[in-house]
Image: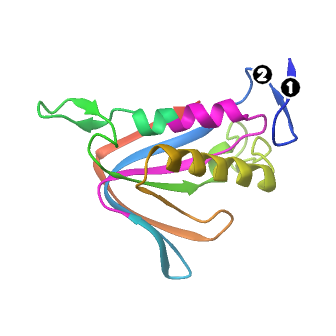
Amino acid sequence: MVNDNIYGIREHIGGVILLAILQRTKQSRVEVASEIIGAIDHGLLVFLGVEKGDGEKQVTRMVERVLGYRIFSDANDQMNLNVQDVEGGVLVVPQFTLAADTNKGMRPSFTPAALPGIAEKFYDDFVMQAKQHYTNIETGRFGADMQVHLCNDGPVTIILRA
């Protein structure tokens, strides 16, 4: 089944999904041209990738999952708290390489990745929706050469698909 979404692209219902890597961090920051453009103390570093076929529902669902995912320890050292519960920061970094197809050869193929203009709209929509639900959101810069620094806490790294 095919549907036209609000971005003017055709999506296959039940098709490809948004990809995110969550890293629980003690601190993280992103720099462009040696300038810090986003930084958080404890919280989540989120690498966000967009594949062809993603839709508005996937963005909303990914925001819910990122902000609600329980990977922070409670008083009993159990992962029962989300980033909002611990009042942590969220640093969202666009990363198209998450959509790489690595099934063949020794070089990734990026054919599954959404076109840059479309991916940027979805990234911006994700950030906008996240900021509507939580105020401690920082970002990278779409299309920029970024250097990302982090101190992974645990380490805890989770792959999400929505």
User: Is residue 58 one of those drawn in magenta?
Assistant: yes
Residue assigned mark 1 = 3
Residue lying farthest to the bottom in this orientation: 34
Q: Is residue 44 left or right of residue 153?
A: right
Query: What residue is drawn where x is 60% and y is 46%?
Result: 126
Q: Secondary structure at mark 2?
A: loop
Residue extent of the magenta highlight:
40-63
Query: What residue is drawn where x is 82% and y is 34%?
Result: 5
Residue 67, above or below 16: below
User: Is residue 39 one of those drawn in magenta?
Assistant: no
Instruction: Answer yes or no: is residue 17 visible.
Output: no
Instruction: Where is residue 144? Give x, y as percent.
Output: 65, 69
Q: Secondary structure at mark 1?
A: strand
Three-letter code, disc 1: Asn
| Number of residues whose C-alpha sits closer than 10 Å to that of mark 2, classed few (under 14), some (14–19) or many (20 or more) | few
Three-letter code, disc 2: Ile
Residue assigned mark 2 = 13
Instruction: Where is residue 110? Give x, y as percent.
Output: 75, 48
Residue 30, above or below 72: below
Foreground residue among 149 and 40: 40
Instruction: Where is residue 52? Give x, y as percent.
Output: 78, 39
Instruction: Where is residue 34? Give x, y as percent.
Output: 50, 82
Query: What residue is drawn where x is 54% and y is 41%?
Result: 20
Foreground residue among 138 and 146: 138
Residue lying farthest to the front in this orientation: 132
Of the 4 image quadrants, the one containing the N terminus is: top right
